[in-house]
Image (cartoon, rainbow, N blue to C red):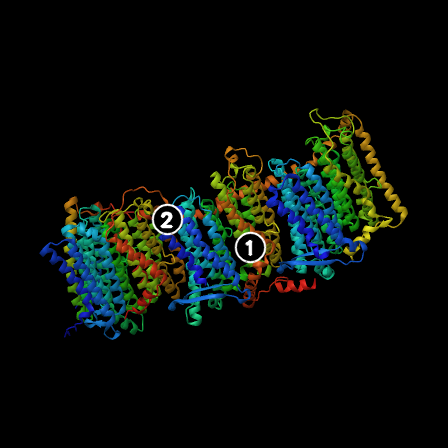
């Protein structure tokens, strides 16, 4: 006898808003074929509404009714915080990619709709307490992104990026869902909370199938966050996909992926931490080292950022190891803004729909357009985790977490990795300031301007006064 | 007051930033003028400083409560001289940079930020805060070397940044570890130096943490064998860069060893005395020997720094009154003399556009004033009594001998070697008949350049004749360090290691 | 009555076959089909697991997955077709310009 | 008067400061006179302050000035006792005369005022050294005189030889200072203070075991550096590159005697280490004869005097080593008179011959410059030890004291005697070669007597060299009593008071002196080819002496060149290669790893898949293994 689930609209309101917004964009487009500005308004309003609803959740949410739809969806602070990050990323991403979107002409509406849909999918994912639900969100988001990757249709690289992303992505999804199935087979549960309670009940060791399941789930998500050795797609996609939207793609996938990882590992199977901690730590180490070392030898800024993303995945993993959800959330928020900012710069320098962005394009940027170069410098230093930037606070947080968990060696590896990482961020700065200008001509900059302003502000202000964001993250605990 | 001292340069930097246009005739003078304010404030601080009062003018504002990090500044006899030195040298370094022809605005801004970072690092009493300053100042220095340096500037800047960053990375790990230990032992998080110094660490942990800190600082000092970034950095850096690097930045290393390693890990410090002392002595001799044959004037001075800073580390780890006083005052002395030497090399470079010793000869004939100043600084650096260098070295040697006799004797060799490499360099550069035409038509020091060197020279003499000026401020703090070590460990200060012993003896005599 | 374990084993086998196919075949279309195969292996697992636990959730989940699979087909085919149009081949090995 | 004592140092120092900053505005002779006035006044102050000692009633007194390095009990304080007083008077007295002389000698030099700046600075430093109330302050003066010596040797900085000599002097001195410094370390570690009084009072109980010997020997190293004793004497001959007044003041009369002064000052320490004292004496004796033999064969007039100085300093060491401190100081004083005289005379000659220094190109100058000739003759006889001139009394007292010490010192006494003979020979040779015989100089050189400003000091010094010895004759030991307060509780070696022995000893040394002088006269009175043959008849010995035993080359071969090699190896092979190589190596390795891994990113989807699956398998396997 199936009991009909009770409805709690607020729980899914933001996702609904985004979905409807996407639909609205398409309808408006079909109906009136308006200028891009209209789309800007529609999407802007949509994002604003979604944000507002999320804030409403924050205000209204209480642990008691955190669970909605008989446990499918949760409204815990963790979900809300990540949702906010996702929505912010959407807004920034659209701003950063706007010149690209506008350049698409008729297909611009599609792009916007896809972005909104992707966000709604991922925001569903971060909010879902049910693994199948999570899978749904994951797929909605991912599939939308596959298409975004291929939006610059007239460019071969874009196609290649799309197909690679698509094949490997769905491969990963399949593995993820198989893991879910195995966990289900082992526990009879899809609900993360349920799994937690169940595992708490196990007196003897739980069946191996669960471990296999957890492993596969972790692998599937590790792919989404481009943690080594599941990162191979990232550089190619970052390089091939349209510059304007790469930042957005990379960011939301990582945020949602890590949210899911944190939720599953730290809530669902925390009792099994004895066995998964070393594995995650291992992934973290491989990611940090591989990412940093490979980034060191890249000649293309977008690939460089991709590999740096791999190493960042590793750093965030240390936070997961430390079980410091607040630190992880802080890191995600900061990194999201910085990454979109970085790609906004790329979009300006290389052009919104260009493929790749050779480091030579940045020679003498410091002379050509000081402000742009300055912003990029701040962002890169933030990513490098130098003090006075929020990046340092973020790294400090996750490292502290890991050390507290007894993973001193991991922290030591991590700090060494940061030095290597610093080396390649600095390389870009060197090229910008210390080489004589090669490229000439002024750069056209659109709404990216605002993205950069925000990114720089976030990097410096939260670097000096991190308390505001840290408190927020500290409250945003998973159920 | 201290907060103001840290923020003044920042404000100055921002002001300079806001001034539009890239014309040096605006920015450089403005920068110099603004950098006088910190100097004035530091001078006032020096004036009102109460030697006996320990840490004073403490500013403490909670930064992020859950992590226990504070904006926590305080000054004592060890940091005071360094702060004054910093604020003194920044205007001079700026005023010495008139030969910089491009992007002067950025240059001034970076220098001022650097100053803020340095002052902050010297004043921080919170390890998190200290690390922030310690690491943050790398960036302006990195740009100063990398943008305004000479041919291989990028290589040098990169090496400087990565090398030092590596050291501080380890230190960061150690700081985290310490803070968490504090959480375990007290339940509350704190990065305050005083709190962390009160922890009781297991021998193993203490040694590891000590090593992490020590490596970070040893790279900064730089202690053999971590010194190789220094010559490159110096040779490539512009004059101002070299001056600040040698005079102040390196001191962070020696200062850190004294302030943090001693306070936080007394046990390990005592155990590490042999290692550190041996490295220091190797540095003294090695740096001097290598300096002898350097073909490049700047490199020579750079290696001389390696040698001189060895004395500071030796004195620090001798853990006697004389040793510590010598170490601290030598921090200042080396700052003044080597800073001045780099200024002079810069002035020579501005005239001749070369630093190769072989390109010179007979300059004393053409630029007697410059030669005179150079010789003066040379003797200050050699440690001629009556000048400041002697005070430091003599105190260090006399203070270290009771603790580490054999090493001290070897270290004393450095005094001879210093005479060899510096006087030989002077002989090759300044004496003889100017044979090369380029050397025949050189203009002697301008009034501006004299104005830059004169105050340094004056201070060198004053400290040499009346070191009490500084020692009175320093001594209580250095004594406090020894007391701390003694009560934390079973370390016994060798006779006659303490002022007490000395005075007793003195009274008898 | 065959033991559920066997269904599971079969599913696992199918999943592996799919995975290996994904790695061995060149044709994007075939690779995609392999992924579909993997998804169906998942479905089989869920059904049998649900049967074993006589719990409906597993069987319900299958529908969701089918839907997702369908969606993937749509997008996937679109991309593949687009590529085929331009390069007259669906071999993924042709698509290796981005590397390093 | 004592409370004005600081003026003794302050006056020359002030003179130096004034001339340094304003000298260029002062006309030529005036700056010289200012400098002379400064030090002259110092002389008078010192003289007045010393009166009580002459009356033999005053006690030594310490005058504190201000704190210097409290942690070391090292402050600025003056010790005013007979020894200090005597040294002060010698330094200021002889110094004043030399200042005046230099006004004439440096006439026309473009850096005239600079010269007097340095001269005054030197005087101040030297006075700091002798007036210091503790070892730290003594070391201050010790180093400062080294500085001045450096500045003045290299005064003509455009001469590469001068610059090199200056550097050599400073560095060699530094090597000695190293020993001295280590000695100070031991002293401080033992007494935890530097003040003389503090140390000497407790010397008895503290100086156990080898401590006294260690300190004594280490001080000897320092003294040997400053006073040009074996093996550190090599700098002094080169130091003759400096203007002659400098050689007279610094490298004959005052600075080089600092070593003797230190040992005398440290008598209470040597009291406890006969061994160290013996070493001091032996070094002195060896140096004395060694340098004397070299002086025999030199052609450069100043070189002769330089080696003679070294040899005479050896005599002083011989004295203080035999704990005949008074004799040592006595000889120090007389030597200051006649050696300054000789140098100034030589200067006057060189001046007249327009900077000719080779005695083979002189001769027959007597008629041209009688005053110089006569005064120098007096100086020569004084040095040779012909009674009743100053040199005789002091030298004879030294020899007598050594003889009285007995034992090993008999041997040293014999060496001293031989040295006396050699001394008489070479100084006579010098005088004869310069002033007698046929002129051997080219026509264009037209020597002339020096101006009065130069001759007057000569005459004054000649007078002193004549009577200076009478202050301490066996008949009337004035100096001895004068110095007593400084050597309280220290055993001082005296000559035997058995008059017969004394007379025999005196006779022997007079004999030696006369023989040497006579031989020198007879040998060189003859025409050049004759004495040339005479010299050749001593080959190869003569050549060896002329080459100063080739010690410089030896040092170059054994120390300098290998040192340079070592440094180069360290700098260019080890530092650049190994140490820095390691650092850059790390960077290269990391990048290399990157380049090495990079190909894994083939761009083929299927390879990515393989990587992916492999990773998955590892993760799952690890988890399962870890789980159950």
Q: Is circle 2 on the same chain as circle 1? A: no
Secondary-structure class at tag 1: helix
The answer to whether one can see residue A162 in this image is no
Q: Residues within 10 Å of mark 1 (few under 14, many from 20)?
A: many
Instruction: Give whichever of D205, B366 is nearer the camera.
Output: B366
Query: Callout 2 environment at 10 Å: few (<14), some (14 to 19), or many (20+)?
Result: some
Position of the C terminus of chain A, as image quadrant, is bottom left
Residue extending farthest left = A31
Q: Observer-nearest residue: D614 or B417? A: B417
> Mark on residue B330?
1
Quadrant into which the N terminus of chain A falls: bottom left
Which residue is at 52% across, 66% downward? B54
Q: Would residue D593 be found to the left or right of residue B270 on screen?
A: left
Residue B35 location in percent, x, y?
Answer: 44, 54
Image location of residue A228, percent across then percent down: 31, 55
Which chain does the numbered disc 1 sit on? B
Whole-angstrom CA distance, mark 2 to mark 1, is: 43 Å
Q: Give the residue pinned by disc 2.
A: D593
């Amino acid at each position: 006898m199936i009991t009909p689930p009770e409805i709690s609209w607020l729980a899914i309101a933001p996702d609904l808003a985004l979905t409807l917004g996407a639909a609205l964009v398409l309808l408006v487009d079909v109906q009136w074929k308006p200028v891009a500005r209209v789309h800007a308004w529609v999407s802007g309003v949509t994002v604003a509404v979604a944000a507002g609803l999320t804030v409403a959740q924050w205000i209204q949410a209480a642990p008691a009714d955190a669970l909605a739809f008989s446990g499918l969806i949760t409204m815990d602070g963790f979900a809300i915080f990540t949702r906010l990050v996702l929505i912010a990323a959407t807004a920034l991403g659209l701003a950063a990619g706007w010149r690209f979107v506008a350049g698409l002409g008729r297909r611009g509406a599609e792009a916007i709709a896809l972005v909104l849909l992707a966000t709604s999918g991922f925001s569903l994912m971060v909010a879902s307490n049910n693994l199948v639900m999570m899978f749904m969100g994951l797929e909605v988001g991912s599939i939308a992104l596959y298409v975004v990757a291929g939006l610059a249709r007239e460019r071969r690289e874009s196609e290649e990026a799309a197909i690679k992303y698509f094949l490997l992505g769905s491969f990963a999804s399949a593995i993820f869902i198989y893991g879910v199935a195995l966990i289900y087979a082992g526990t009879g549960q899809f609900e993360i909370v349920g799994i937690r309670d169940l595992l708490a009940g196990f007196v003897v060791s739980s069946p191996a199938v669960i471990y296999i399941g957890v492993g596969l789930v972790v692998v599937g998500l590790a792919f989404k966050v481009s943690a080594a050795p599941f990162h191979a797609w990232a550089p190619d996609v970052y390089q091939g996909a349209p510059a304007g939207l790469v930042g957005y793609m990379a960011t939301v996938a990582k945020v949602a992926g890590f949210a899911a990882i944190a939720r599953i590992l730290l809530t669902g199977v925390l009792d099994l931490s004895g066995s998964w901690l070393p594995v995650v730590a291992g992934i973290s180490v491989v990611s940090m080292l591989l990412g940093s070392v490979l980034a060191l030898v890249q000649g293309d800024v977008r690939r460089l950022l991709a590999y740096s993303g791999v190493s960042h995945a590793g750093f965030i993993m240390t936070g997961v190891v430390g079980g410091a959800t607040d630190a992880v959330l802080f890191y995600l928020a900061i990194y999201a803004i910085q990454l979109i900012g970085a790609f906004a710069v790329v979009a300006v320098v290389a052009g919104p729909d260009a493929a790749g962005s050779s480091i030579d394009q940045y020679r003498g940027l410091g002379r050509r357009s000081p402000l742009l170069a300055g912003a990029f410098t701040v962002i890169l230093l933030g990513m490098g985790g130098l003090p006075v930037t929020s990046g340092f606070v973020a790294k400090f947080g996750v490292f502290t977490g890991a050390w507290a968990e007894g993973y001193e060696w991991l922290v030591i590896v991590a700090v060494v990795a940061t030095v290597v990482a610093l080396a390649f961020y600095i390389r870009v700065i060197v090229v910008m300031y210390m080489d004589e200008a090669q490229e000439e001509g002024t750069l056209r900059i659109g709404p990216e301007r605002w993205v950069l302003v925000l990114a720089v502000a976030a990097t410096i202000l939260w670097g000096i006064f991190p308390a505001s964001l840290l408190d927020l993250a500290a409250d945003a605990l998973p159920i | 007051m201290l907060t103001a001292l840290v923020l003044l340069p920042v404000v100055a930097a921002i002001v300079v930033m806001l001034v539009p246009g890239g014309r040096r005739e605006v920015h450089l003078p403005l920068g110099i003028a603004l950098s006088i304010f910190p100097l004035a404030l530091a001078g006032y601080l020096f004036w009102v400083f109460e030697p006996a009062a320990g840490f004073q003018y403490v500013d403490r504002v909670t930064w992020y409560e859950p992590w226990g990090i504070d904006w926590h500044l305080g000054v004592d006899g060890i940091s005071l001289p360094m702060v004054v030195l910093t604020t003194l040298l920044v205007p001079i370094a700026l005023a010495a940079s008139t030969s910089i022809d491009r992007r002067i605005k950025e240059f001034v801004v970076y220098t001022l930020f650097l100053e803020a970072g340095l002052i902050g690092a010297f004043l921080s009493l919170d390890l998190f805060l200290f690390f922030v300053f310690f690491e943050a100042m790398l960036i302006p220095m990195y740009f100063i070397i990398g943008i305004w340096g000479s041919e291989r500037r990028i290589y040098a800047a990169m090496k400087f940044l990565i090398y030092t960053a590596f050291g501080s990375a380890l230190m960061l790990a150690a700081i985290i570890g310490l803070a968490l230990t504090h959480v375990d032992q007290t339940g509350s998080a704190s990065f305050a130096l005083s709190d962390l110094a009160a922890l009781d660490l297991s021998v193993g942990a203490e040694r590891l943490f000590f090593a992490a800190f020590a490596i970070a600082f040893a790279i900064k000092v730089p202690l053999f064998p971590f010194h190789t970034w220094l010559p490159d950095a110096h040779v490539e850096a512009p004059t101002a860069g070299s001056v600040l690097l040698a005079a102040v930045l390196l001191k962070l290393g020696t200062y850190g060893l004294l302030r943090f390693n001693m306070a936080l890990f007394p046990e390990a410090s005592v155990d590490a005395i042999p290692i550190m002392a041996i490295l220091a002595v190797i540095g003294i001799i090695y740096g001097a020997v290598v300096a002898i044959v350097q073909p490049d004037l700047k490199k020579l001075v750079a290696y001389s720094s390696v040698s001189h800073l060895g004395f500071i580390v030796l004195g620090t780890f001798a853990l006697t009154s004389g040793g510590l006083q010598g170490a601290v005052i030598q921090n200042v002395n080396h700052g003044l003399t080597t800073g001045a030497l780099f200024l002079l090399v810069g002035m020579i470079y501005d005239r001749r556009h070369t630093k190769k010793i072989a390109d010179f000869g007979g300059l004393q004939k053409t630029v007697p004033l410059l030669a005179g100043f150079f010789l003066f600084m040379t003797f200050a650096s050699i440690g001629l009594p009556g000048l400041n260098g002697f005070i430091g070295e003599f105190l260090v040697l006399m203070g270290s001998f009771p603790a580490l006799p054999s090493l001290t004797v070897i270290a004393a060799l450095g005094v001879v070697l210093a005479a060899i490499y510096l006087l030989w360099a002077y002989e090759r550069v300044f004496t003889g008949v100017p044979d090369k035409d380029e050397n025949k038509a050189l203009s002697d020091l301008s009034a501006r350049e004299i104005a830059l060197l004169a105050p340094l020279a004056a201070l060198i003499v004053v400290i040499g004749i009346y070191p009490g000026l500084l020692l009175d401020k320093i001594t209580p703090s250095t004594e406090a360090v020894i007391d701390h070590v003694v009560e934390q460990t079973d370390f016994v200060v060798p006779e006659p290691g303490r002022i007490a012993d000395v005075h007793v003896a003195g009274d008898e005599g | 009555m065959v033991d559920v374990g066997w269904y599971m084993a079969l599913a696992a086998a199918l999943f592996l076959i799919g995975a290996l196919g994904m790695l061995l075949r060149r044709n994007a279309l075939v690779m995609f089909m392999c992924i579909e195969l993997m998804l169906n292996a998942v479905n089989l697992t869920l059904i049998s697991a649900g049967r074993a636990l006589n719990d409906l959730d597993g069987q319900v989940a299958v529908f969701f997955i089918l839907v997702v699979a369908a969606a993937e087909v749509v997008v996937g085919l679109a991309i593949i077709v687009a590529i085929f149009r331009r390069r007259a081949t669906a071999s993924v090995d042709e698509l290796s310009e981005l590397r390093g | 008067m004592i409370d004005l004592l600081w003026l003794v140092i302050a006056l020359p120092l002030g003179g130096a400061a004034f001339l340094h900053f304003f000298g260029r505005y002062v006309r030529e002779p005036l700056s010289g006179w200012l400098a002379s006035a400064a030090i002259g006044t110092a002389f008078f102050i010192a003289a007045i302050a010393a009166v009580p000692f002459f009356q033999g009633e005053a006690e030594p007194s310490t005058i504190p000035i201000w704190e210097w390095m409290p942690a070391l009990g090292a402050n600025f304080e003056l010790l005013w006792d007979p020894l200090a007083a005597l040294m002060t008077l010698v330094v200021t007295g002889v110094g004043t005369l030399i200042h005046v002389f230099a006004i004439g000698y440096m006439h026309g030099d473009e850096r005239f005022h600079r010269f007097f700046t340095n001269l005054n600075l030197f005087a101040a430093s030297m006075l700091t050294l002798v007036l210091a109330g503790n070892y730290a302050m003594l070391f201050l003066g010790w180093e400062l005189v080294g500085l001045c010596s450096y500045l003045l040797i290299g005064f003509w900085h455009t001469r590469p030889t001068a610059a090199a000599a200056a550097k050599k002097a400073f560095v060699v001195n530094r090597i000695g200072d190293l020993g001295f410094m280590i000695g100070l370390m031991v002293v401080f570690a033992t007494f935890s203070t530097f003040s003389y009084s503090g140390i000497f009072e407790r010397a008895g109980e503290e100086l156990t075991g080898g401590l006294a010997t260690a300190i004594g020997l280490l001080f000897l190293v320092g003294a040997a550096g400053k006073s040009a004793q074996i093996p550190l004497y090599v700098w002094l001959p080169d130091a003759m590159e400096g203007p002659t007044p400098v050689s007279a003041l610094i490298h004959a009369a005052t600075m080089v005697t600092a070593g003797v002064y230190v040992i005398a000052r440290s008598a209470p320490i040597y009291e406890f280490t006969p061994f160290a004292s013996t070493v001091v004496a032996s070094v002195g004796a060896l140096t004395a004869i060694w340098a004397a033999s070299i002086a025999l064969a030199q052609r450069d007039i100043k070189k002769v005097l330089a080696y003679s100085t070294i040899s005479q300093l050896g005599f002083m060491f011989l004295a203080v080593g035999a704990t005949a401190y008074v004799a040592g100081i006595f000889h120090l004083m007389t030597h200051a008179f006649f050696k300054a005289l000789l140098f100034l005379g030589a200067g006057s000659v060189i001046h007249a011959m327009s900077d000719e220094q080779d005695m083979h190109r002189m001769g027959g100058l007597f008629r041209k410059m009688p005053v110089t000739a006569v005064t120098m003759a007096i100086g020569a006889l004084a040095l040779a030890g012909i009674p009743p001139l100053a040199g005789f009394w002091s030298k004879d007292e030294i020899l007598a004291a050594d003889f009285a010490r007995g034992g090993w010192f008999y041997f040293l006494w014999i060496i001293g005697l031989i040295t006396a003979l050699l001394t008489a020979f070479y100084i006579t040779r010098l005088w004869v070669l310069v002033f007698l015989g046929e002129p051997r100089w080219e026509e264009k050189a037209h020597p002339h007597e020096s101006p009065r400003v130069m001759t007057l000091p000569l005459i004054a010094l000649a007078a002193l060299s004549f009577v200076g010895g009478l202050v301490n004759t066996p008949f009337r030991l004035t100096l001895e009593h004068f110095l007593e307060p400084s050597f309280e509780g220290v055993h001082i070696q005296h000559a035997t008071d058995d008059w017969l022995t004394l007379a025999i000893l005196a006779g022997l040394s007079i004999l030696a002196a006369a023989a040497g002088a006579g031989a020198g006269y007879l040998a060189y009175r003859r025409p050049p080819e004759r004495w040339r043959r005479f010299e050749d008849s001593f080959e190869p010995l003569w050549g060896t002496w002329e080459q100063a035993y080739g010690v410089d080359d030896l040092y170059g071969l054994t120390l300098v060149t290998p040192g340079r090699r070592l440094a180069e190896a360290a700098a260019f092979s080890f530092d650049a290669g190994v140490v820095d190589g390691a650092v850059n190596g790390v960077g290269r390795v990391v990048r290399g790893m990157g380049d090495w891994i990079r190909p894994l990113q083939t761009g083929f989807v299927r390879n990515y898949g393989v990587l992916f699956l492999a990773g998955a398998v590892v993760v799952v396997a690890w988890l399962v293994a870890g789980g159950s």
